[in-house]
């Protein structure tokens, strides 16, 4: 680095109010007081989350469109209540986060060859991109709009087949296939 | 039975009850001030603040207290065992000591007594002899023939010191010991730096603090806080409360700025500066020791605000709460009035604490050199000029003001002159600040050539 590379910035000239400091302080205090009273009379943008949810609020007022949200996965069932998945591994191949683990077995039903014996999704590894949903040839795996997904351990957040089917049962009325 | 209980009450010293009340109320308030601080912070930042524990988050303080108690009390290796433990206690004790001289509600008149004056005995000596326990004389005794009538009562003040202001200066500057001891004993560089900064800051801001205190002392001519309040307990033009803040706003502003430094509050909170020093002097503290340090910070806010209210906002004075005797407005015979006065005092303190919080969430922290510059180049010269000007006003205007001559109260004309002096002082300070030589440039350009950034040519042999 040469001396000529150094750019010397000079401080801006202060006005009389700046120099005496207090007028500018009062100015700043006025700003914070304005915000204080605005919040006091209820003009804030805070949403008390568990009671109020953003999907219940119009988008223009700070809500969001939940129908475009990609949340936790579910495994769909067909009309007879059997898992729709045919264990083709398309989703786990498409998955960029490598979070889908399938073990295929011979299907006990005559209309297909394979079905998943195990179907685990690591919800902590998942990036909720929706590629599995797009890759699935039989529309078996889907992302629901549920976003409040919590667990106390990492193990708990690896969802198995039973859990994913249960999510289907819970959400199928709200979000049909 | 009830009668005996009532007569027993006479033997309970009023200051003992006061101590219990003041401690109980102020320590509860301190816990709630933390909630208030968080609420104010949230509202200023367009948030809602704690609102989960109880209605409006009112039980948050209890939750915090329980949390503090159940946390592990950890003392890191290499700390000074004794000093580390006593630092929070020192801080809290010193702050609580300052509560002793706060005049919460004037004087409570509890009764009068008429005694026979033995021949040849001094009136005052006889009165002193007949004075009930734990009571003090109110007003002058009236002599009628061989009979003397005197009134007695008790001051609503834990320790009615006649050098209250002096005591406060001494005690409030001791509060920094907690910070310094805690910072030093922690055996941590961040804590140490926090303590160091607190010391330098305290030394600098003690001077303008004392000078603006002295300004009030010059105006009122007494060091007794109760009397300072008494002298503000009247009205100009019949309706403007004669509080010092209206006569001498500059002194109040200076005092308030110094109080922020004294209480280690933003923008002067360099001792704890979270962004620079982790937690400053309390980095290494955990559990209730940390809790005590934090509580002491808020307790000192109450103490300093109480002093400020006594000096500039007329203490307990509020329209309708003066006693019947206009010459002695603090004396009242109604316990209700005393309680109302204390309530008014408390509300004024809360208002001032709100200002502390408001300022904290508005202003960024000073850099250390700016802090020193503000004290030594601005506040100390200005407060010296203010002291001189106030002295001159009192010297020349005082003898012409009847209220000032008879009762040492500020009359309306004198207050106006003081206000004019304030304006002149501010205008003069603004003018002089223009003429002062500019401070050394903070971003001085250091030549790269020869500095540690120079790329030294390699020796030829290599």
Image (spheres, coloured by chain):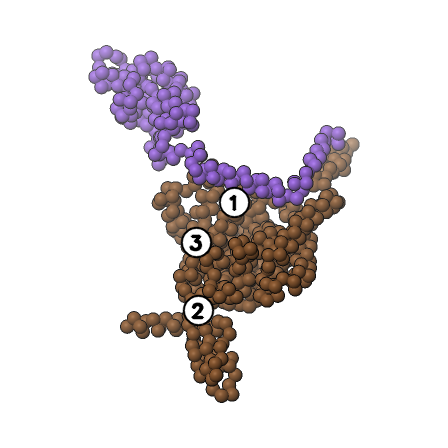
> Which label is found at residue B122?
none
Q: Which residue is mark 3?
A: B29
Residue, x 63% and y 57% (percent of image)? B414
Q: Position of residue B303 (x, y in %)?
A: 51, 57
Q: Which residue is mark 2?
A: B109
Q: Is residue B392 visible?
A: yes
> In which quadrant will I find the N terminus of chain B?
bottom left
Mark 3 vs mark 2: same chain? yes
Q: Which residue is mark 1?
A: B358
Determine the secondary structure under disc 1: helix
Q: Position of residue A46 (x, y in %)?
A: 42, 34
Q: Earlier in the sequence, mark 2 or mark 1?
A: 2
Q: Residue furthest top?
A: A111
User: Mark 3 — on which chain does it sit?
Assistant: B
Q: Nearer the viewer, residue A44 or B192?
A: A44
Residue B333 to residue B30: above or below: below
Q: Residue furthest bottom?
A: B119
Q: Quadrant of residue A122?
A: top left
Q: Nearer the viewer, residue B54 or A107?
A: B54
Q: Position of residue B142 (x, y in %)?
A: 49, 77
B261 vs B19, left or right, is right
Residue, x 34% and y 26% (percent of image)? A146
Residue, x 43% and y 47% (percent of image)? B35
């Amino acid at each position: 680095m040469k001396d000529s590379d150094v750019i010397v910035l000079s401080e801006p000239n202060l006005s009389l109010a700046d120099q005496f400091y207090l007028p500018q302080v009062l100015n700043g205090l006025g700003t914070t007081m304005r915000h204080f009273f605005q919040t006091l009379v209820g003009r804030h943008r805070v949403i008390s989350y568990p009671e109020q949810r953003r999907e219940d609020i119009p988008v223009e007022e700070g809500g969001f469109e939940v129908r475009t949200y990609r949340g936790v996965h579910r495994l769909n069932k067909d009309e007879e209540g059997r898992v729709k998945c045919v264990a083709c591994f398309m989703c786990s191949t498409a998955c960029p986060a490598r979070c889908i683990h399938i073990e295929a077995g011979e299907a006990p039903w005559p209309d297909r060859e394979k079905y998943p014996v195990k179907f685990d999704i690591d919800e902590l590894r998942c990036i909720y991109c929706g590629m599995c949903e797009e890759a699935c040839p039989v529309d078996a795996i889907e992302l629901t709009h549920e976003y409040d997904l919590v667990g106390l351990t990492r193990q708990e957040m690896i969802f198995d087949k039973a859990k994913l089917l249960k999510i289907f049962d819970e959400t199928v009325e709200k979000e049909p296939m | 039975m009830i009668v005996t209980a009532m007569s027993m009450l006479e033997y309970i010293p009023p200051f003992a009850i006061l101590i219990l009340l003041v401690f109980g109320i102020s320590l509860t308030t301190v816990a709630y001030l933390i909630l208030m601080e968080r609420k104010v912070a949230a509202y200023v930042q367009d948030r809602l603040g704690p609102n989960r524990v109880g209605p409006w988050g009112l039980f948050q303080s209890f939750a915090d207290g329980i949390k503090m108690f159940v946390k592990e009390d950890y003392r890191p290796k290499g700390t000074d065992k004794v000093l580390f433990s006593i630092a929070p206690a020192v801080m809290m004790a010193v702050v609580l000591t300052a509560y002793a001289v706060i005049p919460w509600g004037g004087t409570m008149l509890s009764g009068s007594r008429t005694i026979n004056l033995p021949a040849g005995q001094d009136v005052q000596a006889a009165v002193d002899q007949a004075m009930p326990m734990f009571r003090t004389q109110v007003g002058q005794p009236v002599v009628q023939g061989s009979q003397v009538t005197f009134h007695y009562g008790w001051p609503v003040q834990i320790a009615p010191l006649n050098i209250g202001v002096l005591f406060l200066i001494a005690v409030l500057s001791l509060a920094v010991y907690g910070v310094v001891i805690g910072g030093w004993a922690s055996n941590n560089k961040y804590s140490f730096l926090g303590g160091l900064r607190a010391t330098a800051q305290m030394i600098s801001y003690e001077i303008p603090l004392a000078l603006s205190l002295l300004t009030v002392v010059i105006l009122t001519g007494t060091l007794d806080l109760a009397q300072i309040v008494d002298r503000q307990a009247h009205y100009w033009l019949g309706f403007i409360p004669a509080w010092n803040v209206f006569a001498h706003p500059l002194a109040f502003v200076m005092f308030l700025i110094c109080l922020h430094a004294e209480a280690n509050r933003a923008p002067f909170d360099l001792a704890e500066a979270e962004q620079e020093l982790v937690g400053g002097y309390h980095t290494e503290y955990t559990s209730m020791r940390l809790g005590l340090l934090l509580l002491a910070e808020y307790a000192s806010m109450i103490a300093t605000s109480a002093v400020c209210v006594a000096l500039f906002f007329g203490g307990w004075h509020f329209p309708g709460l003066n006693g019947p005797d206009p010459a002695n407005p603090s004396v009242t015979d109604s316990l209700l009035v005393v309680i109302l006065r204390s309530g008014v005092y408390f509300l004024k303190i809360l208002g001032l604490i709100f200002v502390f919080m408001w300022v904290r969430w508005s202003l960024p922290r000073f850099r250390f050199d700016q802090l020193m510059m503000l004290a030594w180049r601005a506040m100390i010269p200005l407060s010296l000029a203010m002291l001189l000007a106030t002295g001159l006003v009192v010297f020349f205007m005082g003898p012409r003001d009847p209220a000032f001559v008879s009762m040492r109260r500020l009359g309306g004309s004198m207050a106006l002159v003081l206000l004019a002096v304030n304006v002149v002082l501010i205008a003069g300070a603004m003018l002089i600040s223009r003429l002062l030589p500019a401070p050394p440039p903070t971003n001085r350009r250091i030549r790269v050539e020869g500095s540690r950034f120079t790329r030294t040519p390699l020796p030829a042999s290599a």
